[in-house]
Amino acid sequence: MMQSQQIPMTFQRYETKYMLSPIMARKLRKSLPGHLQMDEYGLDTICSLYYDTPDHQLIRRSLEKPVYKEKLRLRSYGPAKETSPIYVELKKKYEGIVYKLICSLLGRQVK
């Protein structure tokens, strides 16, 4: 097993999400090909594992739309293999701004 290496990355961003009806989603998908082109990551798989307390406190609090909320997850870009990097992400949202702290776990053993 290789030694774990941590590469911390921190950044902040605004996130805007829109709820689309099934009809609007179909119309959007139909109109995109003439305006957008799929990039090299268009067909990539992202695997996420979210952690919570035994009583699901993090998700319950998040659904209440508080001023401050946080999530903890493991994420891989592409199917997770024994040698692929896994990222531990602490995602915090305060007054509409998302802050993320990301640490890469390299060479870890998958069980």
Image: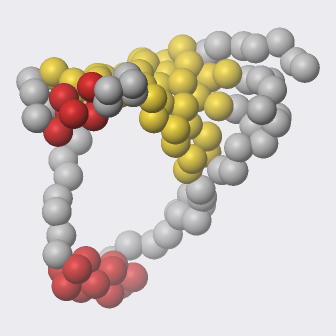
* Quarter that holds the C terminus: top right
Residue 9 x %, y %: 49, 19
Q: Residue at position x 82%, y 36% from top? A: 82
Q: Quadrant of residue 98?
A: top left
Relative placement, left or right, of 22 versus 104 is left
Q: Is residue 14 visible?
A: no
* Quarter that holds the N terminus: top right
Q: Residue at position x 78%, y 42% from top? A: 81
Relative placement, left or right, of 59 versus 106 is left
Q: Residue at position x 10%, y 35% from top? A: 65
Q: Quadrant of residue 54?
A: top left
Residue furthest right as drawn: 1
Residue 109 x %, y %: 80, 26
Residue 103 x %, y %: 56, 19
> In this figure, which colouring scheme has been used for the structure?
secondary structure
Q: Residue at position x 39%, y 82% from top? A: 33
Residue furthest front as drawn: 55
Vertical order, 36 against 66 (above or below): below
Vertical order, 103 against 31 (above or below): above
